[in-house]
Structures are given as structure tokens and as C-alpha cells.
Image (cartoon, rainbow, N blue to C red):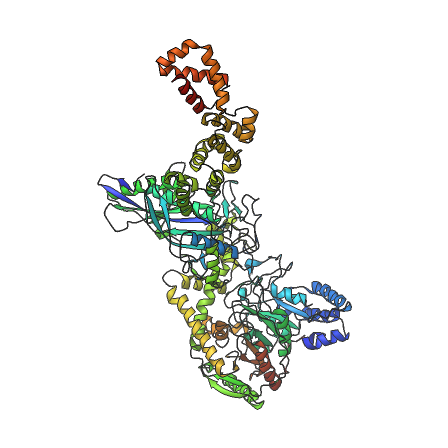
Amino acid sequence: MTELNRLSIAAARDGLAKGDFSARELTQSCADAMAARGDLGAFITPTPERALEAADQADARRKSGDDAPLLGIPLGIKDLFCTEGVQTTAASKILQGFIPTYESSVTTNLLRDGAVFMGKLNLDEFAMGSSNTTSFYGNVVNPWQSTSKPDMELVPGGSSGGSASAVAARLCLGATGTDTGGSIRQPAAFCGITGLKPTYGRCSRWGIVAFASSLDQAGPMARSVEDCAILLGSMAGFDPKDTTSVDTPVPDYTAELGAGVKGLKIGLPREYRVDGMPAEIEQLWQQSAQWLRNQGAEVVEISLPHTHSALPAYYIVAPAEASSNLARYDGVRYGFRADAPDGLPEFASLEEMYATTRGEGFGPEVQRRIMIGAYVLSAGYYDAYYNKARRVRSLIARDFTHAFEQVDAILTPTTPSAAFGITEEPNGVEMYMNDVFTVPASMAGIPGISVPAGLSSDGLPLGVQLLGRPFDEVGLLRVAQALEDAAGFITTPQLMA
Amino acid sequence: MAQTIKGQTGEWEIVIGMEVHAQVLSESKLFSGASTTFGKAPNHNVALVDAALPGMLPVLNQECVRQAVRSGLGIKADINLYSVFDRKNYFYADLPQGYQISQLYHPIVGEGQLTIDLEDGESRTIGIERIHLEQDAGKSIHDQDPHRSFIDLNRTGVALMEIVSMPDLRGGDEASAYMTKLRSILRYLGTCDGNMEQGSMRADVNVSVRPVGSTELGTRTETKNVNSVRFIRQAIEFEARRQVELLEGGGVVVQETRLYDPGKGETRSMRSKEEAHDYRYFPDPDLLPLQLDQGFVDALAADLPELPDEKKARFEADYGLSSYDAGVLVAEKETGDFFEAVASGRDAKLAANWVMGELFGALNKAGTDLADSPVSAESLGGLIEAISDGTISGRTAKDVFASMFATGKTAATIIDEQGLKQISDEGAIESALDEIIAANPAQVEKAKENPKLKGWFVGQVMKATGGQANPAVVNKLINQKLG
């Protein structure tokens, strides 16, 4: 009964259905794995005991004839999803000790379908970062190790770094992530797993701590395309509590898996061939194209002319919305409130209380983005920055609309590099460059998936990204499955439980 | 107060624009399901989104949209089929989100107009620039503890309409007439209860002055949150005088936000333009743009109730009322309805006089209002009928009314109980008169010589009939018999 934690969701589901093992045994296996790999820092709040109780309930449900799609499947939940009765921090000091009285819509859907939550996963503070080094609760370590520098701790990517690390290290079978500019896809690529950012509006944002409301989207992270399809089926759905969620039916996302890519047209955008991109990334990209070609797809070069503007526009829109979304963390109603200075019993003014609380409660990256956001929205700069960025955004969306008139899916690298060392963290702008391939799809609101496709010269996983038409996750998953089959990515990380 | 003010150097024109915040009548808040009921225990009406808990999202209350559109139609305004909610960002303890959701760039209602009636019988049309929907803030309570402030979020997120006028108003009279008329229209529509003492309607008053004849606007000040018609007039009066004195003394008016202190009857500076917040407005990404279809607007327009201007015109035409009387009766919808119930099928002018005279007087004296009137419209109608058909005299009617007001009984009951029915039967009166004539031959002779002495016979007949004889019939018979 060992290594149940290493099963795919699909396999675990079959095993549970056949009675090969119980949800409790499966959950215990994940709880043991979490305990063994606590050094990865993947969880902020592990909840193994609650998980075992939930597993027992799942076993009882199954006994009574219930066959909900995720019944007894252990998942990790990014600590950006509010979970009733379990601390929710967004990896920030300012929410330390905050215990929601409500459950996010996405996690409610997962619970409805029988999922077992192993705990709350680490992330970049307020999902702002690409390395999971901005969390107040410590860095997350990538379970992969470089062959040239095996002693160096690597970043898992971000912001869903805890999710990616936990899934890759087999601490849970799948996890929720959120993606604002690449926060699912980039860590999935760095950790050698599959991560799907659905179409904006596909999953409800209700109960997810907001970063940038017009970009945030929840999605699944798992060890296969099929597992992502299964998870999305439970996570997705219209929610009247989120007016930006879209009222369109949730299809069977596994329906076309294995249908192949024969006759499909795949586009390679020439603008994604950026300066200084390592040769191995370029090679993997071409290799992936060849795999699809070999299976009968037609691969063509396309143009997405406004690609170069996506990143700068993103770093206006996202901080602008964040500066406003994070205003509610003021120490008045919940979470952290700073002590008055010099041992005084109270602050001199409300403003001083705000400034001290927010100064101590937010980390430097969050403060930086709030300042950028406040700046670009301020009187006199609004048109030059925010409005212009919005116009750029519609041009980017139009690029994709035109592209999808010619092709069925777009293939790109997920990241310009493999995972880097926690201590060799690049500077601000270099760090932002990590999102260069993922941000355009976020700006356009279209779905994207990262699939592990090979290894770097240092033996680190590399991902390729597929982008699809709005709400055509079924078609996107179909192409991703073909890629996964061809890539045959079976290598496992060194720090696996 | 006039449209102008006299200074040392000459006449100054007082130019006013008003931004009226009217609380939308709706069961629940603009973006949450929490109740809007006034007077609940602090923090009783608070949904998770009102308290700005993490991950909570606003969902637009369609009833508030309906009400805003109806208000727009009530002031004959353009309804914008496309409008957008923006965030107005600022920090305050009673603003949990750290921003107010409002509509800066694309309001739901565009330009409209409203006619104000002035004391001299003139009326003027005042332009309205826009109406937009926005959230109210909560309440900070600073006077219950020496060290702490308390926050009540009951009002947080309640829907407000901000109704912005053009700078078309001149002087305090027009400004207060504008507020009164606007309140009347909104109450007719049922889109705002107009309870100013509860803060359901309050005004930001923009005042500037300029020499009469000048066409350029002077620098204005904005006096915030004035919550009664009387205070609006007082604040304008003070502010205009202050500005004129400043300008005539060689000073300049500073563009700033001011507060009106009703205790002292003065405005004082709150913050200047330099200290003004940068609200960093941007479209709220949690809410999609609001798209209405014309059919929805048309249906609301078709269903609009009769509004004060139309009702007034109808009262003048149908009931022959004077413009003034009609104006008084339509100011409150309830009064107009009450009047119509009294007047329907009866003498309308008599009805108007009784409603505005005896009834209003009695209500006023009793310190109550029409809603709690002990005399119902039907009951007052009964009294009018008794007067019209001669059952009682006008003089008796006043006593009957007093009894009705005191007891709540109908006119018929009181006339019956107190035996006040007027005798109009000529036969009965004639026999009483004949007896008096027969018993007083000397008086008859005197009266024939001096007709002025006929009054003595009137008195005797009234005495003999217990005061119930119809005076007109009595006079007629005396004239016949005593020539």
C-alpha cells in the first residue's frame, strides 16, 4: 500500500472505485509525504487531521453509493482561496490569523465533488511574484535539483509555487492555483507538472483573495493533462456571486482527450522568439512542433504583432487593480494591526495606524506594486498609463482573435529559462521577464496550459505552452494530451516523497 | 432671499449648483443582499462584501438600477443604455473596501431638467447634468469613548443617487425650491423616501458670486452634506455674504470644501483644493459595464406615476383650483391623493379649502401629519356633503369638524348625536315664525318701519328651533311676512 501519493488522479479514482484502497489510506499516504517533505515549505497551513476526517467521510459517502468525481482525492489548496474555518493568509503577514467564515466558490465545488483538502499551499505574497520568494511564511523549494549544482535550492516559480512544488513532490495528487500573468503555467513548467489557466470567467473568483480582478483566474495543477481536465470539470462553472463569471455550460473536459491532432492547425508566433532566449528553449519549442506535426497537425508560423507590449501593459494594469484591491487590508476589521510606536497605547491618528500596519504587514514586492499602481492611476497620469494599457490590451486580444481565425491552437515556450536558484534571484525587471510568454494570454483572457516537454542541460524540467480559443478548453486539452503523449515526460524530481 | 446680494460696491449675483445625494428606496444595498432598514443596531445590516472581507465581490442590485432609471425619467433626462461603475479610492475607517464604487465617466442618467415654482408665482427650469449611482459610506462615531472611535457599517454600501444640477440656481430661495421639488418628484416616484432628518437626502452646495451682469463664473466653494432645506438656504446666505465681503475687501475666494455648522449658522473650511484627495478613479474590474435595453427603459417610462407638475396642471383644469392651491396640494403625493379622495364627486373648491384650512390647521396644532389624521378623506368628504346639501351650516360644520378630529367619528354620526341637523323645512320654520309674530305685535310694527329690526325675529326663530333653522330660509320667510 506504499506510494499511493504518487498515483495520478485518474488512477486513484479507479483504485478507490474498485476498492483497492480507501480514501483514508490514500490521504494518509499524502499526509506522510507532507510530513517527510516539510523542508520544501510547500504548505503554509497543513491540515492533515481535517483531511483524514474528510477522507473518512468520503469513504462513507462511497459506501452509500456516492460516486462524485473527486470523492476521496487529496488536493492542496493555494492559500489565496478562502477556506471556511482554516486560516487564509495570501502568504502575507497582514492576513496572519485570518480565518474565513466562508468557503470560496471553487473550493466549494471541489468539496461538493468529494475532494479532500490536505492544507493551504504557499505562494508569493498576494500572488505577486514568479519565484515564491515573497511569501511571509518562507520560500518554497523546487523538488528538482540541477545536475551541475545539486546543492543549490531552486525556486519553484510563482506565484503558485507551493502548488507546483507539492504536486511535483507527490505531497498531493493535484492542487488549485491561480493565474494572473502566468502564476499557474510558469511554476508548472519549473516543477515539471501540468498547469491550466482557463478562460477568464470560466471559474468563479468569489472567495479568492483578489490580486488583479480583470486577470485573476483559478485553474488546476496536476501531473497529467487528464488530471487537469478532471479537476477543471469540478472547479469550473457559472457563479451568480461573480458577475464576471460566464454562464456557459461546463463540458466534459476529458471528452476529446486522445482524439489526436490530425488535421488541426497549430501556430507558432514569431514574436515569441525573444533575444537572449537559451538555445535549449528554442530547440524544445521546435521539437514540440515537430511532435505535433508527426501526429498529423499542420504547423504554421503566425504573427501576434503586439506581443512586445503585453508585459509593460500588464505591469500597469495588474498593479493598478492591485493597489485598489489591497486597500481593504488596513488593520481595522481583520488580520494584522501594528502596535503603536514607542510602547504608546494608541496611534496618534488613523493615518498613522494605516501607514504602520500596511508598512509592516506588506512585504517589499507588494508595496512596490501598490506604489506603481497608485502612481499609474493618479490624476494626470491616468490616460498616459492606465488608459493606454487598456487600449494595448484590446489590441493584444485582437491579435489572438485574428490568429484563431487561422489556427486551432498556438504553441510557445512557457518560460524563457528553467528554474533558477533561490539565491540567484534576478532583479525586479528580469524577474518580471519570466512572465513574458504567459502574460499575453492573461491580457487576452484566453486559456493556456503548460505541459512538461523535456529537460534542460542541467536536468531541469522545461515546459511548453499551448493557447486556445476562449472557452475551448476541450480543444486545448486535446492538443495538450497529444503533446504529453509525444513528450513522454516521465522523469521525477529528486526531492520526491 | 433674493437672487442677488447687495455689497459695498454693488449687486452680486449668487450662482449655485447642487449635488444632491438621495438614498435609493430598495430592500437591499447596491451591491449586497444586506437590508437597508434604518435604525437597526450598529453593524446589523452588514454582508461580507460590505465589510470588504477578502475575496468578496459586488453583485449589482437590479432594483437600484430600476429606481435610478425611473428617477431619470422623472426629471425628463436621457437614460444612458451604457454605463460603467468606477472605483473612487481613498482611505477611511468607515469605508471598508478602501474605495467607493461610483460612476464617474459613464453615469446611468444624462441631462435632464426640473421646474421650480417660486413664491411670486413664477417658475424656472433648472438643468440637471447627470444622475449616477454610488455606494454610501458607513458611520464613524467619535463621541462615545475618549480613546476609541466606533464604526457602524449599516449604511455602508446602501445605494445613493447623486443628482448633479447645472449652475442654474440663483440665491437661497431657488436652491431650497429646487431641493423641495426634487424631493417631491422622488417621493412621487417612490425612488427615495426623502427623509432628510434621517439623512436620506442631503446636498453638497456649490456657491459662487459674480457682479450682476457678468457672465463668467466666480470661484466656487462646496459646502458638504447639508441636510435640510432651511440649512441649505442659511448656508448659501452665509457663504454668499462671506464671498462678497472677501472679494470686496480685495481678497480671493479659495476653491475648497466647507462644512455648514447649523448651531452657529456659518460655514467653515474643511479642506482646500491642494489638500484634496487624488481619488485615482478607474473602472471597477469586478463589475461589467451596465448595458440596458431600450425596451426596459420604455416599460419603466410607460409605468411612471403622475408627477407633481402634471398633477398640478390637472388640479387647476379639472377642479378649477388656483395655481397656488394646486401647488400646495400636489407638493406631497399623499396630500394630493387625500385631496382627490375628498373632492371626488363633491365641491372641489370647498374640499380644497377644508383640506388646506381646517384639516392642515388641526394637524399642525396637534403636531401630527396626514398619515395619522384622525379624520379620513372619506369622512371629510361626508362633512363637505353635509355642508353642500344644507344639512348643516358652515358655522356648525366647524364644530362638527372639531368633534370629528377629536373622536374620529364621521360627520353624520356627530350631526345625529348632537342633533345638529339644520331645519330647512319651510313649513316648520313658518309655524315657528307665525307664533312669534302673533305674540309680538309691537315688534312687528317697529320692524315694518325699520327693516333693520328684522334681525330680532331671526334671533327668535333660531332660539325657538334650537339654532337648527336654515338661516337662508328664515330670512326669506321674514322678508315675505314683514315686507
Q: Which one is in front, A155 or B15?
A: B15
Quadrant (top left/top right/bottom left/bottom right) for the N terminus of chain B:
top left
Quadrant (top left/top right/bottom left/bottom right) for the C terminus of chain B:
top left
| Apparent side of residue B482 relative to residue A141 in the rendered image (left or right) | left
Q: Which one is in front, B64 or B50?
A: B64
Residue B311 appears at what percent x and percent y? 42, 45
Splitting the image into 4 quarters, where does residue A135 fall?
bottom right
Furthest residue in direction left, as rendered: B9
Residue A234 appears at what percent x and percent y? 64, 70
| Apparent side of residue A488 relative to residue B73 in the rendered image (left or right) | right
Q: Is residue B292 visible?
A: no
Q: Is residue B383 above or below residue A337?
A: above
Residue B381 appears at what percent x and percent y? 50, 35
Residue B237 appears at what percent x and percent y? 33, 40
Q: How many marks?
A: 0
Splitting the image into 4 quarters, where does residue B321 fall?
top left
| Apparent side of residue A171 relative to residue B198 in the rendered image (left or right) | right
Q: Is residue A221 above or below residue B224?
A: below
Q: Is residue A292 visible?
A: yes
Furthest residue in direction top, as rendered: B442
Q: Which one is in front, B53 or B343?
A: B343
Q: Which one is in front, B15 or B135?
A: B15
